[in-house]
Image: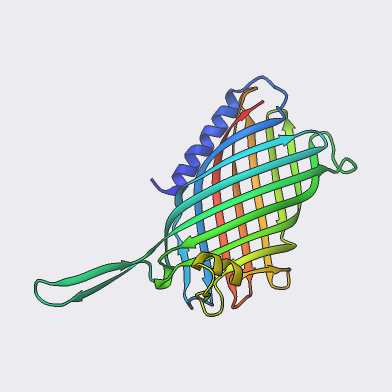
């Protein structure tokens, strides 16, 4: 079954649950959530390779979350991760074979695993002057760490990690107590980025490899060198007083120019199940 069919089936489940829920219940203020979904990442690192690399739709992407919301403020923390394979977008996984004799040969596949993690903490304040009864406007900020590790890409480890602070805005619409539809947007203002140095491998006669990499390859940067934007479209349905379910589509675009341009496009589709109280 293709990814589109799976998404359609899960959407039908959400619609069916909505149709069978007759009573209106107040939305609880706190929620602990578990999410499952797909993640797709494309990147072009001109410092490491002239080739664009990417993953297929990786499943499962697993996430945990905690949120608390009142009429005046909202707080969220999300942790998610996924692992899969990354290959040149044009060529895919490639086979290499060397034949020494009729009975002796050597063969391996040029393909690397990739591990992706994301931690995000957000805080919003309600703009009471703009908000109405069922439509709310929020402004705040987000602290996010994104990490990508491909141990065997381009015949060497590839690691990229960024911790950034972003102003954020959000709008949500609640046609009733049990439905919540919204959008969140944020753009990085300052970041701490770790990436391979110009010589690729950090050199030190005092520090071990990882420590030397972080010391020599980490920079504090502003939007003139580092640009990142997040878009999050979400829907939540309160099934009962204690349980909620919903979905979200997230798009993250990153551009970092030191020592040479790096561009990353990260997309994910998640379905979340929450315990609310």
Q: Residue at x 72, y 57 (%)?
A: 165
In the image, 141 versus 6, the foreground residue is 141
Residue 187 occupies quadrant = bottom right
Quadrant into which the C terminus falls:
top right
Among all residues in the image, which is located at the extreme front? 206
In the image, 162 versus 209, the foreground residue is 209
Q: Is residue 90 visible?
A: no
Residue 261 occupies quadrant = bottom right
Quadrant into which the N terminus falls:
top left
Among all residues in the image, which is located at the extreme right? 129
- Give above or below for 169 relative to 45: above
Q: Residue at x 72, y 28 (%)?
A: 177
Q: Position of residue 40 (x, y in %)?
A: 50, 56
- Give above or below for 181 relative to 119: above
Among all residues in the image, which is located at the extreme top? 23
- Give above or below for 71 relative to 217: above
In the image, 56 versus 209, the foreground residue is 209
Q: Position of residue 14 (x, y in %)?
A: 56, 33
Q: Is residue 114 visible?
A: yes
Among all residues in the image, which is located at the extreme left? 102
Residue 31 occupies quadrant = top right
Q: Residue at x 23, y 69 (%)?
A: 107
């Amino acid at each position: 079954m293709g990814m589109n069919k799976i998404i359609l089936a899960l959407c039908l489940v959400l619609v069916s649950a909505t149709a069978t829920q007759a009573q209106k219940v107040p939305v609880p203020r706190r929620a602990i959530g578990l999410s499952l979904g797909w993640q797709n990442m494309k990147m072009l690192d001109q410092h490491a390779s002239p080739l664009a690399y990417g993953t297929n739709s990786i499943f499962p992407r697993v996430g945990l979350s905690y949120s608390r919301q009142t009429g005046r403020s909202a707080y969220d923390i999300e942790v998610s991760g996924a692992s899969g394979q990354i290959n040149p977008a044009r060529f895919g996984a490639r086979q290499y074979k060397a034949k020494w004799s009729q009975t002796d040969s050597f063969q391996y596949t040029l393909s690397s695993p990739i591990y992706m993690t994301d931690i995000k903490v957000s805080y919003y304040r309600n703009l009471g002057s703009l908000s109405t009864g069922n439509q709310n406007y929020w402004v705040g900020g987000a602290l996010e760490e994104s990490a990508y590790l491909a141990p065997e890409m381009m015949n060497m480890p590839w690691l990229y990690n960024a911790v950034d602070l972003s102003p954020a805005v959000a709008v949500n619409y609640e046609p009733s107590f049990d439905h919540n539809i919204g959008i969140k947007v944020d753009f990085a203002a300052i970041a701490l980025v770790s990436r391979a140095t110009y010589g690729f491998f950090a050199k030190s006669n005092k520090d071990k490899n990882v420590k030397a990499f972080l010391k020599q390859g980490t920079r504090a940067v502003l939007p003139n060198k580092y640009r990142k934007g997040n878009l999050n479209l979400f829907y939540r349905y309160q099934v009962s007083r204690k349980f909620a379910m919903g979905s979200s589509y997230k798009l993250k675009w990153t551009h970092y120019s030191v020592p040479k341009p790096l561009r990353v496009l990260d997309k994910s589709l998640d379905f979340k199940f929450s315990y609310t109280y």
